[in-house]
Image (cartoon, rainbow, N blue to C red):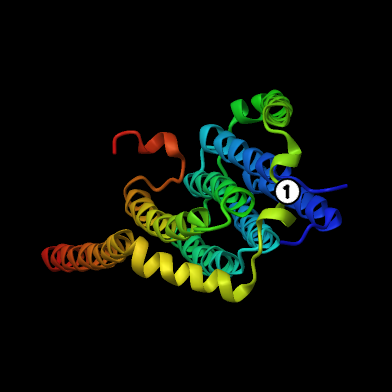
Amino acid sequence: MEITMYHYLFIGLLLFLIGLLGSVLVKNVIKVLISIEIMLLGVNINFITFAAFCDNIRFDGYIISLFYVGIGAVELAVALYLFYLMYQKKESDNIEKFSDL
Amino acid sequence: MIDNPVIFYSASVFIILFALLCLFAKNVVYSLLSSIVVFFFGALFFYVLGSEYNAIIQAAIYGFAVPVLIGLSIMFGGGKTNVKSKRTLSLFLPLCAGIFILAFIYLIMMSLVIMPDTFNPSDVLQVNSFDTIRTFARALFIEYVWAFELVSLLLTIVIAGLGMLGVHRHRGLKRSRGGEK
């Protein structure tokens, strides 16, 4: 059975939806951050898939996913530092207690 | 590109299972370990799709560096990581079912819209490592050089900003301790 583009897009979509589910439902801040990273991984898989299957000249999807990795790491570092500061104030990692940010 | 159904389906099953485990594990350390597995399988997908460079970057940053950051945050959090939520458990099954139904509808619609023979990778794609790296270098340093420089600037600003915040906080703590004495 041949693996087509839709298979990879399907996996990317599933990862995106799982990350979305986690970022909406889970109350732990660290799990929410991990969920956002899973969402970004799904988007990244879609970029790579389109670059591999549709763009055989410039590979724009590869470059965009490379930038995403840099930006995603920066976003995570800043979010974790904010979490650290908020944790020292609130003594909790429940996201509902951070509503007065 | 590696067109092997065994690799694809086994990696797909593992990445979905570990992504779900990552969200719904009670202990956040288990979530972190599951997320490492998810990121490594993401790197495997990139490798299978013919992008070795992205796979290496993904494995290095998301497989090693990001888990260290999250692990440090868990350590600073003191280990009080159990958050009980009845709403999460009650919504888990219907939402999972909804996700799978939506995903299957999406797959069917995509397969109806785009004919599979349109994108045959063996006809349009000739990728090897040298060409991929050369294309990356050309794109990063010629076509996307402004974006590259902006990302570099952003990384520098973040590092400097976090350092400044840390220094200010350290001085504030010293002052408050001095005031107490």
Crowding around mark 1 (Cα neighbors within 10 Å: few <14, some 14 to 19, many 20+) is: few
Residue A43 in the image, given as x and y percentages of width and height: 54, 45
Task: Name the chain letter of the residue that bears numbered label 1.
Answer: B
Whether residue B117 is visible, yes or no, is: yes
Residue drawn at (56%, 69%) of the image: B132
Quadrant where the image shows the N terminus of chain B: bottom right
Tag 1 residue:
B120
* Residue under the image location 33 percent in, 52 percent down: A82
Query: Disc 1 marks which amino acid?
Result: Asn
Q: Quadrant of residue A80?
A: bottom left
User: Which residue: 39% across, 66% down?
Assistant: B140
| Rendered-image quadrant of the C terminus of chain B | bottom left
Q: Nearer the viewer, residue B145 or B68?
A: B145
**Relative horizontal placement of residue A42, taking residue B179 as reference (left or right):** right
Return the residue found at the far bottom: B130
From the top left corner, tell me how far across and down residue A90 is, in percent. Answer: 36, 45
The quadrant where residue B103 appears: top right
Whole-percent x, y for residue B60 in the image: 55, 70
Does the rendering let one see residue B84? no
| Residue positioned 47% across, 60% down in the render | A66
Q: Which image quadrant is residue A100 in?
A: top left
